[in-house]
Amino acid sequence: MILDHFKNIEQYVTANSDLQQVIHVLKNMDLAGVDPGRYEVPGTEAFFMIQKYETKPVLEGVWEAHRKYIDLQYIVSGIELIGYKEISELQITRAYDAESDAVFYNGEGNFITMYSGMFMVLYPQDGHMPGINTGGASRVIKVVAKLPV
């Protein structure tokens, strides 16, 4: 897992071959004004989703991890908690589905407060529970980029 502010993201371009192009696209978009949905990143196998939602209580959250894609979760605006736990310390509740590239888990983990301008990179071993509120619902605009492993 990598956690930092988006202004520092250029330091991590060696983490994935498509990351430089993803950064270029994101820095040249009005992310707050873009409609929610999936967007392809030209010249790469990566894509990203713009998400706009209200955070939820932790009891409604689900632990997840992915195998084909690395997640880059970037908070454009708002505040949320993202849970983190190494998958070897979680219990599988739904087996891996290749079509959705997701496996779901149950367990306990640590929660990191994510503010506007912060990002987190999550690798296949990184169980995560995104979209959790900090005590009350918050309106969040987030980019979730999917970078091929």
Image (spheres, grey):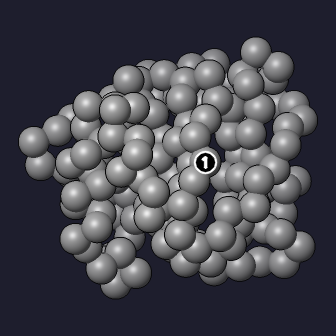
Q: Quadrant of the C terminus?
A: top left
Circle 1 residue = 3
Given the image, on which type of amino acid does mark 1 rest?
Leu
Q: Position of residue 111 (x, y in %)?
A: 81, 50
Residue at screen point 22% across, 58% down: 24
Name the element at disc 1: strand
The answer to whether 83 appears left or right of 126 in the picture is: right
Residue at screen point 68% across, 40% down: 128
Residue at screen point 38% across, 57% down: 49
Residue 36 vs residue 113, the one in the foreground? 113
Q: Position of residue 47 (x, y in %)?
A: 28, 47
- Residue 54 appears in view: no
The answer to whether 99 appears left or right of 106 in the picture is: left
- Residue 30 appears in view: yes
Residue 1 vs residue 63, the one in the foreground? 1
Marks counted in the figure total: 1
The answer to whether 111 appears left or right of 52 in the picture is: right
